[in-house]
Image (cartoon, rainbow, N blue to C red):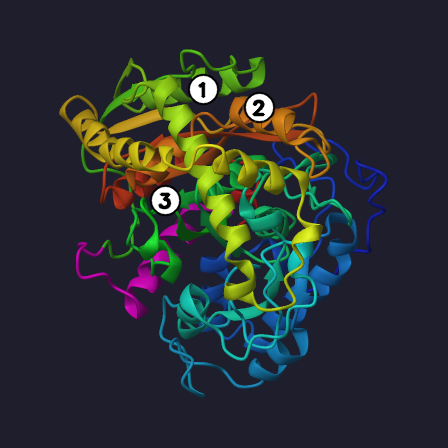
Amino acid sequence: MTTTSPDPVDPRDPVDPRLGPGDPGEPRLPAVHAYHSELARLDAVATVDALDARELSPREVTVAAIERARAVDPAIAAVMFERYDRALAQSTAERTPNGSGAGRSRRGSLAAIPTFIKDMVPVAGLPCTWGAAALEGAPPQSRTRGVARDIENMGMTILGTSTMPEWGFVPSTEFPERPPTRNPWNLDHTIGGSSGGSAALVAAGVVPIGHAVDGGGSIRIPAACGGLVGLKPTMGRMRRHADERNLPVSISVDGVVTRTVRDAARFHAEMERVFRPRSMAPMGEVTGPPSRRLRIGHYDEIPGEVAIDAPTRATHEATVKLLEDLGHRVEPTGPPVEPEQFREDFIFYYRFLVYAATNTARLTHGAHYDPSRLTRYSQGMAASFRQAPSRIVGVSRRLRRVRSQVAAMKQRYDVLLSPTVATVPPPLGHLGANVDFDPLLGRIAEWMPFTPLANAAGTPSITLPMGFDDATHLPIGAMLSGDVGDDALLLQLGLELEAARPWDLARLS
């Protein structure tokens, strides 16, 4: 199996001239990618199969991934900190799935699969800066912690950390003082956020799986922008962040972005081996479609919100038709909450989160924290919370009620279908870190009205790359959402849709 690496691509040219439209039967490819390498075309499951068949060694997989990262990252700027030397040293011996030593990995594991961890979870030997210039100069972490430790215990190889916007509170991975993370499909457009670095690395073919965290859409939004699969799991299915336990409402959950649904299913099955919550029935590995036809409610607009654009509407309508063709009962509905009140409450809760993050940063992160380097957005969000802090009581109470409102949906529907975001990924700068607070907040609310509901309810939600805008050469996501514990059902439906209409990057595997 060959492992040739592509030459770096000039990030000033959004279209790689080496990539023509190809044959009609060939999948579209990002403008910047590493799929010239045969190994890069393997998803995680196929890579595991090649490792089990001894067609590849763990070291070959690691070396190739590092070469791909070095080739494409100058164009996409998605790697925050790397630890390639440590990853190479770890790959010299074949690891068991729990990382406990040498020996053959059991079939079906993700041992030796390379990945990046979002720069908000500690990884040994690397700083943890949460994408914030205010935390520049952070010392290397002494230990790998939290979900990153679980991922390491699964046997996966951590190559480094991936970029994210400051604190993860903006859905575009842009920075006030350094280049943005670019969308590999079109370098002039956002890859979304806040897990933008991981999505860019997976979309460009550097790694098949990237760690992500979703507190308002931060797994699903960059996955949609990158033509990827992004499952936000049910709250509690993954190990919870320590600080979430102290918040009035828990909204943030870890997960991954992948090229294929089967990779997402394999990841969560393997995660259950190292972390299985007592309060939730295990999923096991999802390998096929739903066992019955489903009742699916769909909506593509929210009253009082900006209308979706034409490519997003076309994708939504095509997904409705495909689900109907597959025998599911699909009918129009609306969101299960009062949209205006929910929007105001969720935005205010984010004001509180920014206030809390910025005001406890010195205690949480250390004396290197420099609040003078915070973005105008973070400063504005924190200041606006201080104008009416007592509102957090009523806001938190109403957000906790969202769970029961979503649960009531199950009386009529198994799954809800909606767009992931309102438009194709906007140009870089539209959601940039240097935009003033008020206009930036308005643009964020207009672009992502669909994703926050699952965060407030703690319910699972998955985005799938169901459309493509030829005018901008950008993918478009469709989002499926269920009730608490319906993660496996969403993966089953995702597998069915993927088989019926394979998307571009899935067809490479």
Q: Is residue 401 left or right of residue 206?
A: left
Q: Amino acid at mark 3?
A: Ile
Q: Secondary structure at mark 2?
A: helix
506 relative to 358, above or below: above
Q: Which mark is residue 424?
A: none
Q: Which residue is mark 3?
A: 251
27 relative to 107, above or below: above
Decide which of 390, 174 is in the foreground and name it: 390
Residue 450: image x %, image y %? 43, 27
User: Dot 1 surroundings within 10 Å: few (below 14), some, or many (20 or more)?
Assistant: many
Residue 356: image x %, image y %? 47, 49
Residue 34 makes an appearance in the image: no
User: Dot 2 surroundings within 10 Å: few (below 14), some, or many (20 or more)?
Assistant: few
Decide which of 142, 499 is in the foreground and name it: 142
Q: Amino acid at mark 2?
A: Gly
Provide the residue span drawn in magenta: 259-282
Residue at 60% across, 42% down: 378
* CA distance separating discs 2 and 1: 24 Å
Q: Which residue is mark 2?
A: 442
Decide which of 153, 148 is in the foreground and name it: 148
270 relative to 477, above or below: below
Residue 138 makes an appearance in the image: yes
Cβ–Cβ under 8 Å for marks 2 and 1:
no
Q: Secondary structure at mark 1?
A: helix
Q: Which residue is mark 1?
A: 316
Residue at 43% across, 87% down: 101
Cβ–Cβ under 8 Å for marks 3 and 2:
no
